[in-house]
Image (cartoon, rainbow, N blue to C red):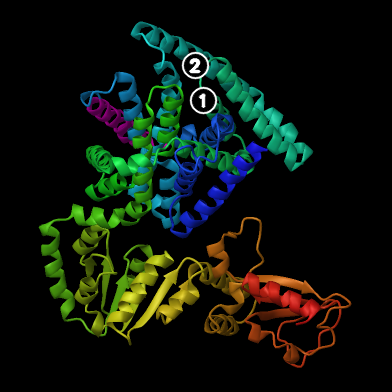
C-alpha cells in the first residue's frame, strides 16, 4: 500500500507543478524537477527508497534517446556538417576543457571534474528547439547555428554515458583498459545493431504495418527499443546507447513519424518520472545555505558558454548578430546534464553536496532560458551595432523627415519588397523599416528608402514620420510581432490606416481589436486567388468572380474561417481559442428544435453562424429566419468549438 501512496504523491505534485509552470510559460522539465524536490527525501520525504523508481525513470532516458535517434539523420548531419563539425564539436570540446580545468583548479578530482565539465558543456535540446519552433526562429541563421550545436551535443552525450560508469572504478591503468575494452565492445554492438536494423527491422515493420492494428505497432516499437537497450546493457554499455542506435536505424524508414507519435506519450511520462527522481536528489536547503556559490556558478558558466559560442560562430564566418543570438539561446544546462549528474551520483562519483549545487544551478539556468531566447535577438542586435550604424540612421532620418502622405512598410522581406515595387510604379512615396542589417544596407545601396531598427520602437516610427503617413503596412507573418507593432502605431497615431498581413486567421480578431483596419490572412487570400482562377477557367464571367471575392473580403472572410478539423489540426488550448470549426448536426426524430423556426431559436445571438442546412438532397445556403427545421435535417454550424457544442445540445435537448 505504501508504494501506491508514494506514486499518488508523485502524481499530485507533478500535475500541480506542471500546471503552475505552464501558466507561467516555464518549461515542463523544470516543473518535474521541482515536483521531485518537493516529494523527495530533502523535501516532504513522501517517497521512501526512490531506487524503485530509478528503473522506470531510466526507461524515460531510453525512450528519449530512441526519439533522438529517430530525429538524428545522417543526411541532415552531412548537410549541416560545416556548422556541426566546425562550431558544434569545438563548442563541446572547448567548453568541456574550460570547465574541466576550472574544476581541477578548485581542487576536484579528475573524475568529478570530467562529469562537471561534461554536464556544463551541454545545453537543453528540448527547451531550445521547442522555443525556437514556437517563435518561428528555427528558420533564422541563429536558429540553425543553435540546432547544429545541439546536434553535436546530442552525439557527444553517448560516449559520456558510456564513460561515467567506469569512473567509479579506481586505478588509472585499469580505467584506460576498461575504456578500451568498452570501445571494442561498443564497435561490435554498433555493427551488430546496425546490420540487424538495416536488414531485419524494415521487413519486420512492413509485416506489422500490414496487420493494421495500432496496438501491435506500439508494442513492437516498445519491444524493439527495449531489446536494443537490453543488448547494449548485456555488453556492459549504457541502455541509452542501444535505444539511440535503434532509433537511428528506424529513422531512415517510412514509419519514422508514426513511431515518433506512438512512443511520445510513454517518453513524456517516463521522462517526467526521470526528472522527478533527479529532483529528489536536490537538497533545497543548499539553495538557502549557499546561494552565493550557486549564483556565482550560474552566472560564471553561462558567461563562459556565451563567450565560447560567440567566438566560435564568428570564427566560422557567421555574422556577429547571429553568433550572439545563438550564444544567448544555448547558455543554459541541458536535460542530458541532469542525466549525467544523476548517473554520476548513482555510481558515487559525485557527493550529495556537489550533486545538489549542480542541479540547483541547472534548474535556475533553465528557468532563465525562455526569457533569454525571447530577448536573444534584441540583445544581439544592440551588441552587434555601434556608432557607425547610428550615423547611417541619422542620415536616414533626414531623408524621411520631409515625407508626408506616404506609406510606412514594417518589415522589408519578400512581402514588403513586393508592396514597395507596386508603390514605386504608382509613384507613391514610402519608407520601410527592417531589423536585418544586411538587408538594410543592400537595399539602401540600391537607393531604397529603408530605416534600420525595430518597428516596435517609438523613435524608429518617429523617424519614419508616422504622424504624416496615410497608411502603415505590417508585413511580418508572425501575429504576436504584428500585434505589438499595431498597438505601438495606434498609440502614436489614431487616424492612420493600418493593414496587417498574417499567415492565417488565428489572430484576426485580436489584431482588429488592437486597431488594425484590415487584416489579410495569407492562407485565406491564397484560397481566394485559387478560387478566382478556378471560376474563371470554368467559364464564370470575370466581373462576377470579382464580385464574389469582394463580398467574401467585405464579410472579413467569414465563410472561410470555419473548416472541418482533421487528425493533424492543432487542437492545443491556445489554437482552439482562436479557431472556428465547421460542424454538422443531424437533428434526430425527437430533437427539441424540430418544427421550430430559426428566428425562435435565436442561434446567432449565441455567437454561432449557420453555414447551410441540408434536407435530403437539397442544400440551403441562404436561409430565411422563418425557415422551419424538421427531423433528419442536417444543420451545418460554424463557430468556436465550445459554442458549437453548446448549440448542438441546445438543438437536440432544448434550453
Residue 490 or 240: which is nearer the viewer?
A: 240
Q: Position of residue 57 (x, y in %)?
A: 55, 34
Q: Is residue 182 above or below residue 151?
A: above
Q: Which residues are magenta?
A: 78-103
Describe the element under mark 2 as helix, strand or loop.
helix
Q: Is residue 8 above or below residue 605?
A: above
Residue 361 shows in the view: no
Give residue 421's quadrant in the image: bottom left
Give residue 210's quadrant in the image: top right
**Contact between labelled residues 1 and 2, with CB atoms less than 8 Å apart:** yes
Can you identify the residue that label 2 sits on? 186
Can you identify the residue that label 1 sits on? 241
| Spatial separation of the CA atoms under disc 2 and disc 1 | 9 Å
Q: Position of residue 388 (x, y in %)?
A: 11, 58
Q: Position of residue 537 (x, y in %)?
A: 62, 72
Please tell me which residue is depicted at 25% across the width and 53% down the height of the picture.
Answer: 380
Q: Position of residue 351 (x, y in %)?
A: 37, 26
Residue 388 or 532: which is nearer the viewer?
A: 388
Query: Magenta segment, principal secondary structure?
Result: helix
Q: Is residue 136 above or below residue 546?
A: above
Residue 207 or 344: which is nearer the viewer?
A: 344
Q: Is residue 476 left or right of residue 198?
A: left
Q: Is residue 340 left or right of residue 332?
A: right
Q: Which quadrant, please, contains the C terminus?
A: bottom right
Q: Is residue 113 left or right of residue 125?
A: left
Marked residue nearer the N-terminal end (2 or 1): 2
Residue 350 or 202: which is nearer the viewer?
A: 350
**Classed neighbour count for the residue bearing mark 2: other residues with Cα under 10 Å, few (<14), some (14–19), many (≥20):** many
Amino acid at each position: 500500500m505504501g508504494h501506491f501512496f508514494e506514486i499518488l504523491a508523485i502524481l499530485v505534485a507533478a500535475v500541480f507543478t506542471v500546471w503552475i509552470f505552464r501558466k507561467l510559460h516555464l518549461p515542463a522539465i523544470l516543473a518535474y524537477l521541482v515536483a521531485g524536490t518537493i516529494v523527495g527525501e530533502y523535501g516532504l520525504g513522501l517517497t521512501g527508497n526512490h531506487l524503485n523508481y530509478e528503473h522506470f525513470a531510466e526507461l524515460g532516458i531510453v525512450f528519449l534517446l530512441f526519439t533522438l535517434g529517430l530525429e538524428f539523420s545522417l543526411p541532415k548531419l552531412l548537410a549541416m556538417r560545416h556548422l556541426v563539425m566546425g562550431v558544434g564539436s569545438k563548442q563541446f570540446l572547448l567548453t568541456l576543457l574550460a570547465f574541466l580545468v576550472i574544476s581541477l583548479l578548485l581542487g576536484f578530482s579528475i573524475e568529478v571534474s570530467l562529469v562537471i565539465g561534461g554536464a556544463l558543456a551541454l545545453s537543453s535540446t528540448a527547451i531550445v528547439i521547442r522555443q525556437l519552433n514556437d517563435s518561428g526562429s528555427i528558420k533564422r541563421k541563429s536558429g540553425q547555428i543553435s540546432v547544429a550545436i545541439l546536434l553535436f551535443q546530442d552525439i557527444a552525450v553517448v560516449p559520456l554515458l558510456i564513460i561515467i560508469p567506469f569512473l567509479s572504478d579506481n586505478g588509472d591503468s585499469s580505467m584506460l583498459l576498461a575504456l578500451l575494452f568498452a570501445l571494442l565492445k561498443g564497435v561490435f554492438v554498433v555493427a551488430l545493431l546496425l546490420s540487424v536494423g538495416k536488414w531485419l527491422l524494415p521487413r519486420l515493420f512492413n509485416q506489422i504495418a500490414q496487420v493494421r492494428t495500432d496496438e501491435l505497432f506500439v508494442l513492437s516499437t516498445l519491444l524493439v527499443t527495449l531489446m536494443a537497450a537490453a543488448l547494449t546493457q548485456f555488453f556492459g554499455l549504457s541502455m541509452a546507447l542501444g535505444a539511440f542506435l535503434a532509433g537511428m536505424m528506424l529513422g531512415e524508414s517510412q514509419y519514422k513519424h508514426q513511431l515518433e507519435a506512438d512512443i511520445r506519450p510513454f517518453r513524456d511520462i517516463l521522462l517526467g518520472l526521470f526528472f522527478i527522481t533527479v529532483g529528489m536528489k536536490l537538497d533545497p536547503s543548499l539553495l538557502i545555505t549557499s546561494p552565493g556559490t550557486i549564483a556565482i556558478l550560474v552566472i560564471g558558466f553561462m558567461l563562459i558558454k556565451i563567450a565560447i559560442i560567440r567566438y566560435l560562430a564568428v570564427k566560422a564566418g557567421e555574422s556577429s548578430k547571429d553568433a550572439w543570438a545563438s550564444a544567448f539561446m544555448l547558455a543554459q544546462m541541458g536535460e542530458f546534464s541532469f542525466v549525467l549528474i544523476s548517473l554520476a551520483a548513482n555510481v558515487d562519483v559525485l557527493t550529495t553536496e556537489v550533486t545538489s549545487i549542480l542541479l540547483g544551478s541547472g534548474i535556475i539556468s533553465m528557468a532563465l532560458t525562455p526569457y533569454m531566447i525571447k530577448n536573444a535577438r534584441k540583445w544581439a542586435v544592440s551588441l552587434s551595432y555601434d556608432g557607425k550604424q547610428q550615423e547611417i540612421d541619422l542620415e536616414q532620418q533626414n531623408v524621411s523627415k520631409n515625407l508626408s502622405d506616404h506609406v510606412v512598410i514594417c518589415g522589408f522581406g519578400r512581402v514588403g519588397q513586393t508592396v514597395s515595387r507596386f508603390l514605386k510604379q504608382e509613384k507613391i512615396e514610402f519608407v520601410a523599416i527592417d531589423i536585418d542589417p544586411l538587408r538594410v544596407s543592400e537595399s539602401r545601396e540600391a537607393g531604397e528608402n529603408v530605416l534600420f531598427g525595430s518597428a516596435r520602437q517609438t523613435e524608429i516610427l518617429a523617424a519614419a514620420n508616422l504622424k504624416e503617413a496615410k497608411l502603415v503596412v505590417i508585413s511580418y507573418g508572425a501575429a504576436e510581432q504584428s500585434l505589438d507593432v499595431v498597438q505601438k502605431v495606434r498609440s502614436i497615431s489614431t487616424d492612420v490606416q493600418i493593414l496587417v498581413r498574417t499567415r492565417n486567421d488565428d489572430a484576426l480578431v485580436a489584431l482588429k481589436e488592437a486597431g488594425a483596419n484590415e487584416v489579410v490572412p495569407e492562407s485565406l487570400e491564397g484560397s481566394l486567388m485559387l478560387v478566382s482562377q478556378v471560376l474563371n477557367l470554368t467559364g464564370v464571367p470575370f466581373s462576377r468572380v470579382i464580385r464574389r471575392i469582394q463580398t467574401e473580403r467585405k464579410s472579413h472572410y467569414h465563410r472561410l474561417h470555419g473548416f472541418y478539423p482533421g487528425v493533424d489540426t492543432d487542437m492545443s488550448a491556445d489554437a482552439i481559442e482562436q479557431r472556428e470549426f465547421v460542424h454538422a448536426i443531424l437533428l434526430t426524430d425527437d430533437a427539441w428544435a424540430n418544427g421550430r423556426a430559426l428566428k425562435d431559436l435565436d442561434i446567432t445571438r449565441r455567437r454561432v453562424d449557420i453555414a447551410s442546412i441540408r434536407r435530403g438532397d437539397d442544400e440551403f445556403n441562404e436561409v430565411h429566419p422563418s425557415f422551419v427545421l424538421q427531423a433528419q435535417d442536417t444543420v451545418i454550424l460554424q463557430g468556436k468549438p465550445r459554442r458549437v457544442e453548446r448549440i448542438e445540445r441546445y438543438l437536440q435537448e432544448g434550453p
